[in-house]
Amino acid sequence: MPGLDVGARLDQTPFVESNQQVFDDVAASFTEMSLMPAERSVLRRLAPHIADLDMLDLGIGTGRTTWTYAPLVHRYVGIDYSPKMLAAARRRLGHEPGIELQLGDARDLSAIEGDFDFILFSFNAIDAVPPDGRLQILDEVRSKLRPGGLFQFSAHSLGTLPFDTHRPYSARLADVPGYRLYATVAGVRYARRIRRINRGLDLSAARRRGWDVIPSMAHNFRIRDYYVDPEFQVRQLREHRLEVTAVFDTEGREVTLPHPSRDPWLDYLCTPI
Ligand SMILES: C[S@@+](CC[C@H](N)C(=O)[O-])C[C@H]1O[C@@H](n2cnc3c(N)ncnc32)[C@H](O)[C@@H]1O
């Protein structure tokens, strides 16, 4: 099974380069343009002053969030470290006036001019960075945020583990001839792969530590992601002088911690302290 071979190979390679390579490989599949519920919740909060805000968007992929935010804010800067993702974003949106798109790594924002009222790192992109890089990013973000500014990012939750072995059916494809047979066969393979990943988890150790790095559901398990205990995430942010002001579930509802759901990720909104 190709996915397992890739997984075995990734186990032996330094994972930052691997994840960056995978993002390059999958750029063509990033076609979504709408905001996610938690992003809409924060956008509603920003709305009264949005035209005055300078925004830095990290890991923009092919420009999903650029599409919504760039025309609304005062200044929009978007970066991504995948040349193919950035090229796709440029093809889609680079011609729009007032959009600054740059190839760049969120671990080093020294090449980005100025500072910002709102910094976004959406769709769990921060989780693809190794643990030490994550801390560098928090420091870089902190240094680029104006007093009273806001940083929003989403991060995979440890509480979602172990993974559910059921592969969800696609309601959109349900009536496509052959889909049900395909989905049944794919579901058996998926369950086998998940059981293998679940067997490799040491959840007690991960809960004690507050995080773990494991093969991620995203991109057919080709990347490895950081999964974090939400309360640990809040403490980690505080150590990097960022205070969480709100946490949102995948439906965009504000939640309080500890949060018992098994949502695959949560969105954190924080401000510099
Ligand atoms: C899951 S995609 C999300 C794309 C987009 N933010 C969205 O929400 O649709 C993650 C993106 O973050 C980028 N990325 C991951 N780590 C990065 C880093 N350290 N610096 C810049 N971009 C990064 C990847 O290349 C990829 O385009």
Image (cartoon, helix red, strand yellow):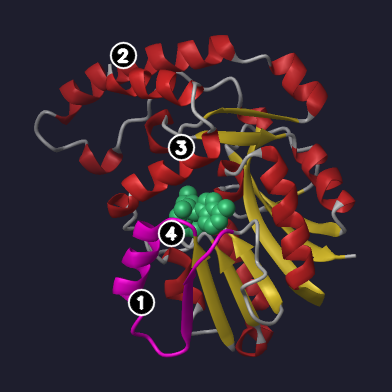
**Image location of residue 192, percent across then percent down:** 39, 11
**Looking at the rendered structure, which numbered label has been put on residue 93?**
1
Label 1, label 3: how far apart the Cα atoms are: 27 Å
Q: Earlier in the sequence, mark 4 or mark 2?
A: 4
Label 3, label 4: how far apart the Cα atoms are: 16 Å
Residue topped by disc 4: 61
Q: Circle 2 sits in a helix, a strand or a loop, which is it?
A: helix
Q: Circle 4 sits in a helix, a strand or a loop, which is it?
A: loop
Q: Circle 3 sits in a helix, a strand or a loop, which is it?
A: helix
* Front tag of 2 and 1: 1
Question: In the shown orientation, is residue 60 left or right of residue 175?
Answer: right
Identity of the amino acid at label 3?
Ser
Tell which of 153 and 116 is nearer to you: 116
Q: Residue 189 magenta-drawn? A: no
Identity of the amino acid at label 1?
Leu
**Looking at the rendered structure, which numbered label has been put on residue 18?**
3
* Front tag of 1 and 3: 3
Mark 4 in CB contact with mark 2 (< 8 angstroms): no
Q: Is residue 3 above or below residue 174?
A: above
**Image location of residue 255, percent across then percent down:** 74, 48
